[in-house]
Amino acid sequence: MSVRVCFVCLGNICRSPTAEGVFRHLVREAGLDHAFVIDSAGTAAHHVGEAPDPRSTAAAKRRGIVLEGAARKFVAADFERFDYVIALDGRNFDDLRRLAPHDEARARLSMLRDHDPSSPRRADVPDPYYGGSRGFEEVLDLCERACEGLLASLRERHGV
Ligand code: 4NP
């Protein structure tokens, strides 16, 4: 049985495709492709169908990480499709909590940076959309640290 993980931000064009790409990269490096289903989605629909933001794609590419997929909106039924629904910021987390149909779905929710032992609790991955290129590098730095922690804890919990 695969461990199913979905990263969720607002637009699904900057932060969550980055987290998805970083996590997939780490999973591949570990030779664990077969053990995971990895996806991302957004709480808003403005960018549905779009490829990841070119600024995110370029920053990731410089680190050897490929971003892929087309933006989609996270829907309540996704709580049945994923074991872990991981919010990139507190607003995404609150929106997902409201959307969750039952306690079991709420129990699948976490904040990405809470998987980084060096991060303060409940910390956001800041939205880079309206800022400069430094913001996209910061998103990558934060996603790399948190995804390393996430992969380590999922490997331990699921014995993979
Ligand atoms: P994301 O970034 O949530 O990291 O994909 C954003 C993308 C688009 C907008 C905001 C944030 N927007 O307002 O269009």
Image (cartoon, rainbow, N blue to C red):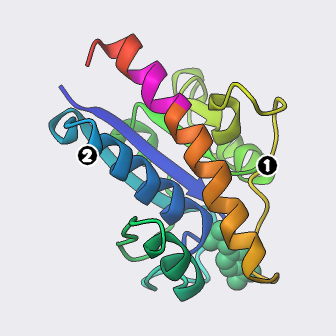
Considering the whole magenta stretch, tell me its main secondary structure.
helix
| Side of 82 relative to 19 (left or right) | left
Sequence-first disc among 2 and 1: 2
**Quarter of the picture for ligand 1?**
bottom right
Q: Which residue is mark 1?
A: 124
Q: 58 or 38, which is in the foreground? A: 58
Nearer the observer: mark 2 or 1; the answer is 2
125 within the magenta span: no
In the picture shown, does residue 5 fall above or below 59? Answer: above
Q: State the image quarter where residue 103 is shown.
A: top right
The percent position of residue 110, horizontal first and vertical second, equals 63, 33
Is residue 125 or residue 3 the one in the foreground? Answer: 125
Task: Specify whether residue 105 is in view.
Answer: yes
Q: Is residue 156 left or right of residue 59?
A: left
Respond yes or no on whether mark 1 lies under 8 Å from ligand 1: no
Q: Residue at x 70, y 31 (%)?
A: 114
Picture quarter with the C terminus:
top left
The span picked out in magenta is 149-154
- Say whether residue 76 is visible: no
Q: Nearer the viewer, residue 25 or 81?
A: 25
Residue found 28% across the figure and 12% down from its top: 159
Residue flagged by tag 2: what amino acid is it? Answer: Arg
